[in-house]
Image: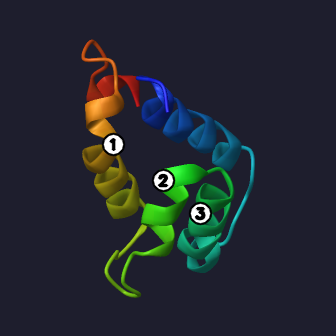
Amino acid sequence: MDKQTPILLINKFCRRILQIDLEEVDEDAWYYKVFSENLCGQALMWFTQLEPGSIGNFNELSAVFLRKYSILMDKSTSDTDI
């Protein structure tokens, strides 16, 4: 991953999600699925090794992902860039 990959991945994902109208009940499950389909390498391995039920919703997943991979982000990137 280059330094901006984690933040760019979240941004790309959010733009894609905004284009789809989902019922609230299905949103998190769909978000997990689409998010995982955009991962590769170590990030995909990390995702597949999460304990079932350890993440409550997609907002929590994205926060955990960004914390995990924040070392790879450009230090000039802030939360407002997400």
Please name the residue shown 33% across and 42% down the image: 69
Q: Amino acid at mark 3?
A: Tyr
On screen, residue 46 versus residue 74, left or right, reads right
Q: Earlier along the polypeptide chain: callout 2 or callout 1?
A: 2
Q: Earlier along the polypeptide chain: callout 2 or callout 3?
A: 3
What's the CA distance linking mark 2 and mark 1?
Answer: 8 Å
Q: Position of residue 60 (x, y in %)?
A: 32, 62
Q: Position of residue 28 (x, y in %)?
A: 53, 70
Please name the residue shown 74% across and 44% down the image: 19
Q: Amino acid at mark 2?
A: Ala
Image height check: is 24 above or below 9?
Answer: below
Q: According to the image, what is the colour scheme of the structure?
A: rainbow
What's the CA distance linking mark 1 and mark 3?
Answer: 19 Å
Q: Residues within 10 Å of mark 3 (few under 14, many from 20)?
A: some
Q: Which residue reaches farthest right?
A: 20
On screen, residue 12 versus residue 21, left or right, reads left
Please name the residue shown 34% across and 75% down the image: 55
How many numbered badges does the structure rendering display?
Answer: 3
Question: Which element type, helix, strand or loop, lies under badge 2?
Answer: helix
Q: Which mark is residue 31?
A: 3
Q: Position of residue 46 (x, y in %)?
A: 43, 63
Which image quadrant is residue 9 in?
top right
Question: Which element type, helix, strand or loop, lies under badge 3?
Answer: helix
Q: Position of residue 14 (x, y in %)?
A: 57, 42
Question: In the rendered image, which quarter contains the C terminus?
Answer: top left
Q: Amino acid at mark 1?
A: Tyr
Q: Which residue is mark 2?
A: 43
Q: Which mark is residue 69?
A: 1
Residue 28 versus residue 35: which sits nearer the camera?
A: 35
Q: Residues within 10 Å of mark 2 (few under 14, many from 20)?
A: some
